Image (cartoon, rainbow, N blue to C red):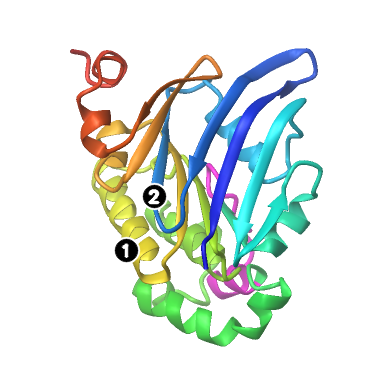
Amino acid sequence: MANSIAISGVHAGYGQVRVLEDVSLDVRAAETVVLLGTNGNGKSTLIKCLMGMVRPSAGTIVAEIDGKTHNLVGLSTEEIVDLGIALVPEGRRLFPKLTVEENLLLGAFRPTARAAKERNLDFCYGMFGRLKERRNQLAGSMSGGEQQMLALARALMTAPRILLIDEPSVGLAPILVSRTIDTIKELQSKYNLTVLMAEQNFNQAIRIADRGYVIVHGKIAFEGNSADELNNNDLIRKFYLGL
């Protein structure tokens, strides 16, 4: 069944500070959409709106999951996760003093995920062999790349239909960024996930994008209906490629 997100006319911020102004975008079933923007332009705030961490002052956020429509505005983060929307947060946000496997099992708390816990754990260990090797290692003692693998795997343990990924390249060496982006594409394909990825590394993000948006000062400045449109846009050439 279709799993999608439609955001329309969203305004949001923190107290008197407005961050997002009239943001509209959509993510259709089983596609990877990238939200491109440099630091401070509102990418993470929009992701937080989707997850119920920031409540919009105006606008709508509607998710269709397994054929049912849900208005996300006003729902708690727990309720949104329970619908089948998972977040891989910026900075990974693991539990550093818990083991790899304990972090993974914490991802399987929602009822649907509990029923598929063993199957999803096997899938994650199959996808991320390094995690299986280090299942008893404390998460905080792992490298940045390994922690990013764990953050992705923990999100998969929730048995998601829609996956939100916030700045997966932050803090990683270039070779690890490339591997992480490749892994996201592989996961999207194997799980048939609908993916929205906020990222400032244009060259890496564009490799797996079906479509994308550029956000500048809290507003959608450009919508690219294909990777080629994004790659050939003057705004992107100015901000990301220095051309």
Q: Which of the 4 image quadrants contains residue 185? A: bottom left
Residue 129 % position (x, y): 35, 75
**Mark 2 and mark 1: Cα distance apart in space:** 11 Å
Q: Main secondary structure of the magenta part?
A: loop
Front position in the image: 79 or 202: 79
Front position in the image: 183 or 10: 10
Label 2 sits on what residue type? Thr
Q: Which of the 4 image quadrants contains residue 228? A: top left
Q: Where's the C terminus, which quadrant?
A: top left
Residue drawn at 78 percent across, 13 percent down: 16
Residue 125 % position (x, y): 42, 78
Residue on which the image places disc 1: 186
Residue 136: which numbered mark, if any? Answer: none
Residue 92 is inside the magenta segment? yes
Residue drawn at 71 percent across, 71 percent down: 110
Residue drawn at 39 percent across, 49 percent down: 32
Residue 207 is inside the magenta segment? no
Residue on which the image places disc 2: 32
Secondary structure, mark 1, is helix
Label 1 sits on what residue type? Glu
Residue 172 appears left or right of 96: left
Residue 99 appears left or right of 199: right
Q: Which of the 4 image quadrants contains residue 189? A: bottom left
Q: Is residue 128 visible?
A: no
Q: Badge 2: how crowded within 10 Å, few (<14), some, or many (20+)?
A: many
Q: Is residue 183 visible?
A: yes
Front position in the image: 12 or 183: 12
Q: Give the residues drawn in magenta, as a range.
A: 89-105
**Compared to 124, does 173 lie above or below?**
above
